[in-house]
Image (spheres, grey):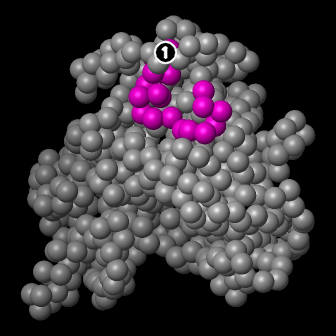
Amino acid sequence: MKLLIAFCCMVFLLWPMSSIAGQSKLQSRAERTRYAETSLYADVIDFIAELQRASANVKVETFTVTNEGRALPLVILSKPAISSPAEAAASGKPVVFIMANIHAGEVEGKEATQHIMRDVVTGSLGHLLDKIVLLVAPIYNADGNEKIDIMNRSAQNGPSGGVGVRENGQRLDLNRDFMKLESPEARGLIGGVFNRWDPHVIIDLHTTNGSYHGYALTYSPCLNPNSDRKLTSFAREKLLPDVTRTLKSKHKYNIYFYGNFADPTQPARELRPNESGDPKVWATFDHRPRFGNNYEGLRNRIAILSEAYSYLSFRARVDVTDKFVRAILEYVAGHAKEVVDLVREADRYSVATGTTSGNEEGFGVSFELKASPRPVEILVGSVNRIVDPRTNRPRLEATDEARPVKMTEYGEFQATRRIRPPAAYVLKPDQRKIIDVLLAHGVAVETLTKEETFTVERYTVNEISRAQRAFQGHKEARLKVTASETREKFPAGSFLVSMNQPKAALIFYLLEPESDDGLANWNFFDEELDNGAKEGGPAHYPVFRLKTEIRTPRQLLKR
């Protein structure tokens, strides 16, 4: 891996510059074309090489290589320059990671991050590096980015030169791959950025379409109730409201918590934009950690999702994304010690208790949207429909209309059923495939050095239901189980996964059989559960729960 990083850094340094007469070398393709086009992979690599030439405070490494062979750059901006996570940790500064272009049709973040990096290196944002370490992955879905076509996201308001596609080279949605880790992009992101650099704050840049609202950008913190409540509250009640005020007062942009207009009887069902009458409900999207902002929250980190409004002009979408990220960076820099202390305390709490703040009674396995206690003013917007002469398809443009309408907001989730986590999970040696996924997530795993017999909780599977249609190559499974206490023999080499570690909430979500986004849901146990049922007896879930910590010879498993 070190050789790969070194090689790719040399590639970035030596990549030939774009030569466009009379224009700055540190301009994005969007700027050079007056926002008619979005950057290709080569444009982004050229831009990063120019940043390196401009400042010794810019370092670059590769965190993975895509299916189609593109090295994904991670840009490290720091002062004084750092080259390793150990140096970042020793600085005491919060590490902020910005990820753009996870969906390569949603290109605003790719352009905005280039502009922000330029201003950190040569312009008005240089002071931020006195307080933070900044990591940027500007073109996460590089393979999807290169499939630019004017027919992609044709209802979106520009760029006129077209955009890429949503999926990666495997036709996987990378923002649904955070738990199962089936793409090289997701495995590299988790291993090469989250596990390696361990950022305190993660900003994930997208573009939204759908409901015709009156916001230039909507946003969301982690939505999963199993995350640390203090971290989520910091984002929801302090950071994001401050950023909202900044964008309104300084830049005249209205921004708000992510939502869509929904059916008041079924808040999870989005209303079609042309349904008549004033909307009654504004509802957020999903609590599951297959989505990046929710996954990051289960890792005890501060997560922020950004969604520029698809029907604004491309230039305006880039601008509001740029301003939103800058305001977040300024806030984090101004509250650097608080951010570091909050994250450190969340990790300490999980290590000490095996849970997260606010979930002392158990982690949730079932959830529902929670209604606001009183109506909230939401800006309702409208669009004009024009026929795009390039595609002969309707294209939508936001109007200046934005009228406040009071309605119920479903902006958060609550657990409807909780299960107390065990002290540890135990798996037998034949479950190495499961352990490899845990290790990829950065979970600490130990192995037993001799045979042991423990009193454990064992799950009997009473029912398995699978989706009729495949999603991301899987027919998702839901299990109904009952727990019973039993004595079980575990041979040497069995795996012990203690809950007393920072990723306790993530471990629970991955391993519990009734989890709505765990490994059972993604079919990792299907073969042996089906085989167990075929043998005539009840199928037993092959992950066991220890109620109390045990003292037994064991050693840390290294990947």
Q: Residue at x 44, y 46 (%)?
A: 148
Please name the residue that numbered disc 1 is placed on.
Answer: 19
Residue 324, image quadrant: top right
Position in image of residue 220 (x %, y %)? 66, 55
Mark 1: which amino acid? Answer: Ser
Q: Is residue 250 above or below residue 262?
A: above
**Which x, y percent locates residue 172?**
35, 58
The residue at 36%/71% (across/down) is 471
Residue at 71 percent of width and 32 percent of height: 326
Is residue 335 depicted above or below 379 in this figure?
above
Magenta span covers which residues? 32-51
Q: Residue furthest front?
A: 389
Residue placed most toward the observer, 202 or 264: 264
Which corner quadrant holds the C terminus? Answer: top left
Work out whether residue 252 or residue 400 is closer to the camera in this orientation and state it. 400
Can I make out residue 228 in this image? no
Membership of 237 in magenta stretch? no
Q: Describe residue 99's horizontal placement relative to residue 468 as left or right.
A: right
Count of marks placed on residues: 1
Residue at 50 percent of width and 65 percent of height: 288
Q: Position of residue 496 (x, y in %)?
A: 27, 54
| Numbered disc 1: secondary structure | loop
Residue 254 image point, x, y percent: 83, 51
Question: Which of 554 and 295 lies nearest the eye of the viewer?
Answer: 295
**Residue projecting furthest to the bottom:** 536
Query: Visible in this render: residue 329?
Result: yes
